[in-house]
Amino acid sequence: MPEGKIIKALSGFYYVLHNGETIQCRGRGIFRKNKITPLVGDEVVFQAENDLEGYILEIKERKNELVRPPIANVDQAILVFSAVEPDFSTLLLDRFLVLIEFNHIKPLICITKIDLTNHDQLVAISEYSEQYRKAGYEVVLTSSETATGIEQLYPHIENRISVFAGQSGVGKSSLLNAIRPDLELKTSGISTHLGRGKHTTRHVELISIGNGLVADTPGFSSLEFTNLEAEDLTFCFPEMTKASENCKFRGCLHLSEPKCGVKAALEAGEIPKYRYEHYLDFLQEIKDRKPRY
């Protein structure tokens, strides 16, 4: 049986890439029975009725999967955040980073709309960028209008499956258009009434860029730590993971425990205060979560 990769899912159809050709497929009923939904990025076995239509028979084991956006087997998440319009949010970025780290996906922070910043805003963004770099993340500053930083993205995209994710209205589609102008993806600005982005991307689709595949995804502005446990959270903050090696007690949650390596690193200025505060917020959220049955 032929095998391929789902590159688009839309209205109950799955578009499978096989030997350079795209075959429109439906999923067999067994997937619904087993409560398995084929996802973009899935490696699948399919049966082709003809050159254009077929059925997905089997989904290969996934190395990872995301719920929102619904995509599987991702190598890298390019987290797109705007410097302004909407304003840069470390809280929202840290929520994304925690989810990405928990799913063992390599993150790349991409801050867009640099051309719209004034001097003070640019200084602040540069300081945040340096702090995230010190934490262990790669950060690229870009502008879709002036093409600033676009060249820096190409090596990250090559030979990988990347997902572009971030709050709606930050310019994900504009950035993809700047990377590959022939895409002509629909873009939209900020809603003046709501103060947030209008959704322009309605489905997930893998787009070929060089020798890599990139997913443009529907924007979203909230994430829930559904499967994350309190003891997992430290390992979603790289700088805290390193500092926790100096904690006296195994399983330290870095609250009021004595001889805590994370608290010591915080006091020494090695961990930004806002990152630790976000950790505390997320930890409380996880503790307050209703138990699953």
Image (cartoon, rainbow, N blue to C red):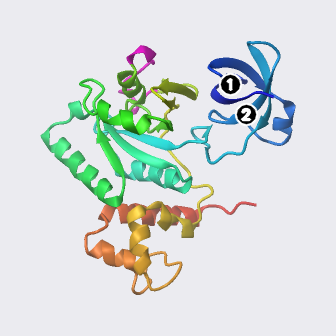
Magenta segment boundaries in residue numbering: 181-198
Q: Position of residue 12 (x, y in %)?
A: 73, 24
Q: Is residue 44 left or right of residue 103?
A: right
Q: Which residue is drawn at the image coordinates 73% and 33% (left, top)? A: 44
Tag 1: residue type? Answer: Val
Secondary element under disc 1, as helix, strand or loop, is strand
Confirm whether the magenta stretch covers residue 193. yes
Rendered image quadrant of residue 264: bottom left
Confirm whether the magenta stretch covers residue 12. no
On screen, 230 above or below 62?
below
Rendered image quadrant of residue 22: top right
Q: Which residue is drawn at the image coordinates 37% and 44% (left, top)? A: 109
Secondary element under disc 2, as helix, strand or loop, is strand
Q: Is residue 255 left or right of residue 59?
A: left
- Asked if the residue at tag 1 contacts the one at tag 2, i.e. Cβ–Cβ closer than 8 Å, the answer is yes
Please name the predominant secondary structure of the magenta segment in the image: loop
Relative to the observer, which residue lies in front, 175 or 42?
42
**Which of marks 1 and 2 precedes in the sequence?**
1
On screen, 168 above or below 246?
above
Tag 2: residue type? Answer: Val
Relative to the observer, which residue lies in front, 200 or 42?
42
On screen, 269 above or below 155?
below
Rendered image quadrant of residue 136: bottom left
Q: Which mark is residue 16?
A: 1
**Residue 250 can be seen, yes or no:** yes
Q: Which residue is drawn at the image coordinates 30% and 26% (left, top)? A: 144
Q: Which residue is mark 2?
A: 44
Quadrant holding the C terminus: bottom right
Q: Position of residue 20 (x, y in %)?
A: 62, 20
Relative to the observer, which residue lies in front, 43 or 183?
43
**Residue 88 can be seen, yes or no:** no
Give the residue at the far left of this rendering: 119
